[in-house]
Amino acid sequence: MKKKSGWSSKITEKRLKGVVYALLVSFILVIVAISPLGLGTENMSLRQIMIIFSFASWILFLILGIILGVLTLKSKVKGKLKAYLLLTGFSSAGFFIAIILHNLIFALFGVEEAVFFIIAIVICPICFLIGAIGSIVMFRRKRKK
């Protein structure tokens, strides 16, 4: 029987680890980008630059989350590490999706709903941090063995 030499066999834990670390960096970028937006800067060009930076950070965070989820599903990683990687990837994509759904429901029905808001503001960040920290711990444990 031939060994599969497809795309999924080239996905290594090293690449997955790189995506997790990139997600952590983009998460920090999102926090840094959002922080000054509420300050009400008088300089409109600076404010516009910060809005663009914030939007780009969110898009990067979403794309990296989707990439991590797909790579994890296609890789041979199993067990707790796979669960942590999927939690990290899908919770980072969940931020963006929940925000879009929250705003879409308000725009279509004129009703302020709290479910998607709470998912985006409370649940997704907690799940992301649990998944990211768990993934890093599992990667370190595997490296020590």
Image (tube, rainbow, N blue to C red):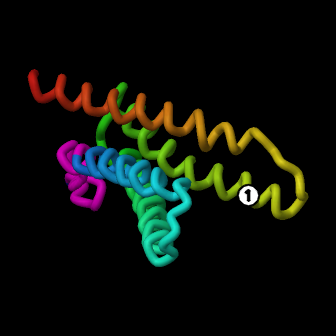
In this picture, residue 51 sits left or right of residue 23: right
Residue at 42 percent of width and 57 percent of height = 33
Residues packed near mark 1 inside 10 Å, few (<14), some (14 to 19) or many (20 plus):
some
The amino acid marked with disc number 1 is Asn
Magenta residues, dominant SS class? helix
Q: Is residue 91 left or right of residue 17?
A: right
| Residue 14, image x, y percentages | 18, 46
Q: Considering depth in this image, is 62 or 11 the residue closer to the camera?
A: 62
Q: Residue furthest front?
A: 42
Image quadrant of residue 132? top left
In depth, the one of 57 and 16 nearer the eye is 57
Please name the residue that numbered disc 1 is placed on.
Answer: 103
Whether residue 14 sits left or right of residue 87 in the image: it is: left
Indicate whether residue 64 is drawn in magenta.
Answer: no
Q: Is residue 138 visible?
A: yes
Front-lying residue, 77 or 15: 15
**Where, quadrant-wise, is the C terminus in this rendering?**
top left
Residue at (30%, 37%) from the top-left corner? 77
Give me the residue at 37% from left, 38% from top.
85
Tell me if residue 144 comes above or below residue 12 in the rendering.
above
Q: What residue span does the magenta drawing correspond to?
A: 3-17
Farthest left residue in view = 144
Image mark count: 1
Secondary structure at badge 1 equals helix
Q: Is residue 1 visible?
A: no
Q: Is residue 142 above or below residue 35?
A: above
Where's residue 142, x and y in %? 17, 27
Q: Residue at x 86, y 63 (%)?
A: 108
x then y, percent, for residue 65? 43, 52
